[in-house]
Amino acid sequence: MGIYEECRRILYEEADYLNEGRNADRFRRNFRGDERIRTPRIYWRYASTRVLTLEYLPGIKISNYEALTAAGIDRAAVARLAAESYLRQLLESGFFHADPHPGNLAISAEGHLIFYDFGMMGQIKPITREKLVGVFLGIARKDADMVVSALVDLGALEVKGDRGPVRRAVQYTLDNTFGQPLAEQSMGTIRDDLYELAYDRPFRFPATFTFVLRALSTLEGLGRGLDANFNFMEIAKPYALALMETATTTVG
C-alpha cells in the first residue's frame, strides 16, 4: 500500500507543471557549479498549471550509441558521468530524478549530460540517509545483527519475537550477494535478491526505495550499452568508502 500511495501521489504531482518547474529549478541549483550537468531553465512568465515553457537544450539521446560515437563523444565518460550524477543526487542532496529512461536524458555536443522532465522526482530525507549509514556499515562488515537492527531503526523491518530466522536470511544474502567481487555484482541482481529476501518476511522497504532501485537498474542498463566494461558498483565504491568513514565515526 505504501508503494501504491507513493505512485498515486507522484502521478498527480507529475500532472502539475508548476510543481515540475519548481523541481527543475531545485535540481539545477543542486548541480550549480558543475557545467557537466545541464537542466533547462524555466520561463516562469510563460508557465501555468497547464503550460510549461523551458529553455531549448538540444542533445543526442543517451541511448543513441551510434550517434554519440559519430559525434566523437566518449561513451565511457558519459556512462560514468550518469552514474556519478545519480550517486550525488542520492547521497548528497537526497533529491533525485525518479524516471531516468533514455527519453529523459541527452548528451550535448560538449559531452554534458542533459536531464529533462522533472515531474517524477524522489526525495530521501536527511534522517533516513543518516540511518542508512548503519545499514551500509553492517553490510561492509557482513554483520547481519547490525543490518537487522539498522533496518528496524529505519522502519524497513518489523520483527516481533525471535530475530533468528530474519538474521540468518540477511546473513545468507550478505555472504552470497555482497560477498561477490564488485566486477560480478549488478544493481539488477542486488535488487532481485533484496525483493526475494523480503518476500514472506516482515520487510517493509520504504516506497521511495522502489524508485531508487528502479532508477539505478535503468542507469546500469544504459551504462552497459554505452560502455561494455561499465560497472556501477565500481563507480560507487569511492562513495561507499566515504559513507563507511562517516559510519565508522558516527556508529563507532
Image: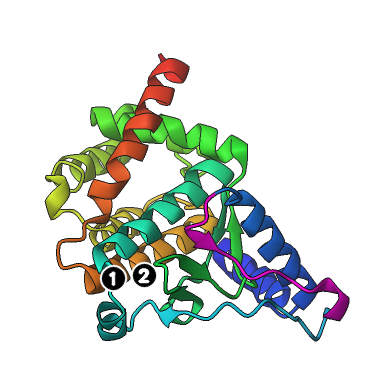
Q: Residue at x 45, y 75 (%)?
A: 106
Q: Residue at x 79, y 72 (%)?
A: 18
Q: Main secondary structure of the magenta part?
A: loop
Q: Which residues are magenta?
A: 34-46
Applied colour scheme: rainbow
Between 197 and 53, the residue placed more toward the observer is 53
Q: Secondary structure at mark 2?
A: helix
Image vertical order of residue 161 relative to residue 227, above or below: above
Disc 2 and disc 1 in contact, CB within 8 angstroms: yes
Quadrant containing the C terminus is top left
Left or right: where 251 falls relative to 221: right
Q: Measure the C-alpha gap from mark 2 to mark 1.
A: 5 Å
Residue 163 visible in the picture? no
Crowding at dot 1, Cα within 10 Å, few <14 / some 14-19 / many 20+, comes out as some
Q: Residue at x 15, y 61 (%)?
A: 229
Residue 12 visible in the picture? yes
The residue wearing badge 2 is 218
Q: Residue at x 37, y 23 (%)?
A: 245
Percent position of residue 96, x then y: 55, 57
